Image (cartoon, helix red, strand yellow):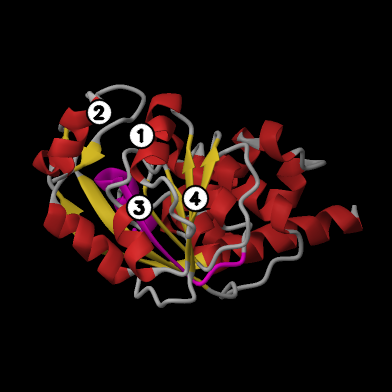
Amino acid sequence: MVRSILYHYGIHGGQHDQHFLVDEAILDRIVGSANIVPDDIVLEIGAGIGNLTERLLRQAGRVIAVESDPKLVAVLEDRFKGEEKLHLIHGDALKVEFPLFDKVVANLPYSISSEITFKLFRYDFKLGVLMYQYEFARRMIAKPGSDDYSRLTVNTTYFADVSVIMKVPKGAFSPPPQVESAVVKVCPRPTPFTVVNKEFFFKFVTAVFTKRRKKIKNAIIESNHILGIYNVRQVVSRLPEDLMELRPENLYPVQLAALSDRILELQQEA
């Protein structure tokens, strides 16, 4: 069915992140994992030829589909002509303001995975079921001390609980991408730890993970061009010694949050 739609409209893909999910069973499982009810407003980012869109329309009260490619917008307009439940937005998902939505279900363009994920976290929504590159998904759910544990892990932990629903083989797409993919469930929730200054916390996490293999005390000093800590060596000398001997990749998000808060406290004392 999906392949026939590609053929009918002469859509080939293979560039600009255009790898169309054609496996019907996986499409059905993605939509099923979102537990959509009739009054849900569902956001879809990168609607493509509408292979997910048509399934979402069967279950949701309204579907907001965002697509930037004018050729694909034309396909969507033709396929869903007269569909009152569909609100189609022709625009860049990173630039447009999303209308209110309850859930987000999407085969995301991999090149904007990080940016679009953290844009979504600025909105109040119940659930996300999102396709990512498998490597990216692994970093979202990584544990401290693992090779995949990163800035992405810590920042994601601040906003949501994340789990991998399934891996998706390359052959499920047309044309096949060069990487494996994964479907991820994202459940926003209140942050499990508090920070004095959220903006500084995220800056701190970014800074120290640029030096993830260094001890945290050296990572802070060497990345201070990002942090701008006054008298940074003196500040580091007053941070907990046991944590200063660890590497950023070995610190739990709550420990990084505590260090961020302590640095701000010491700056106020200076």
Q: Mark 3 or mark 4, which has the lower sequence index?
A: 3
Q: Is 26 placed left or right of 229 in the picture?
A: left
60 w.r.t. 145: above or below: below
Please say whether residue 85 is visible from this viewpoint. yes
Q: Is 49 placed left or right of 241 in the picture?
A: left
Q: Marks 3 and 1, Cα distance to the nearest angstrom? A: 12 Å
Q: In the image shown, does 47 or 267 lie closer to the viewer?
A: 47
Q: Marks 4 and 1, Cα distance to the nearest angstrom? A: 26 Å
Three-letter amino acid code of the residue under disc 1: Val
Residue 60 percent across, percent down from the top left: 41, 68
Three-letter amino acid code of the residue under disc 3: Thr
Q: Marks 2 and 1, Cα distance to the nearest angstrom? A: 7 Å
Q: Which mark is residue 243?
A: none
179 w.r.t. 16: above or below: below
Residue at x 40%, y 77% (from the top left corner)? 37
Q: Marks 4 and 2, Cα distance to the nearest angstrom? A: 30 Å
**Residue bearing mark 3:** 53
The image shows a total of numbered marks equal to 4
Q: Which mark is residue 75?
A: 1
Residue at x 34%, y 57% (from the top left corner)? 145
**Residue bearing mark 2:** 9
Q: Secondary structure at mark 2?
A: helix
Q: Mark 4 or mark 1, which has the lower sequence index?
A: 1
State the extent of the magenta-drawn residues as a range. Answer: 124-143
Q: Quadrant of residue 73?
A: top left
Q: Marks 3 and 2, Cα distance to the nearest angstrom? A: 16 Å
Q: Mark 2 or mark 1, which has the lower sequence index?
A: 2
**Residue bearing mark 4:** 117
Residue at x 63%, y 55% (from the top left corner)? 99
Q: Secondary structure at mark 3?
A: helix
Residue 182 percent across, percent down from the top left: 24, 52
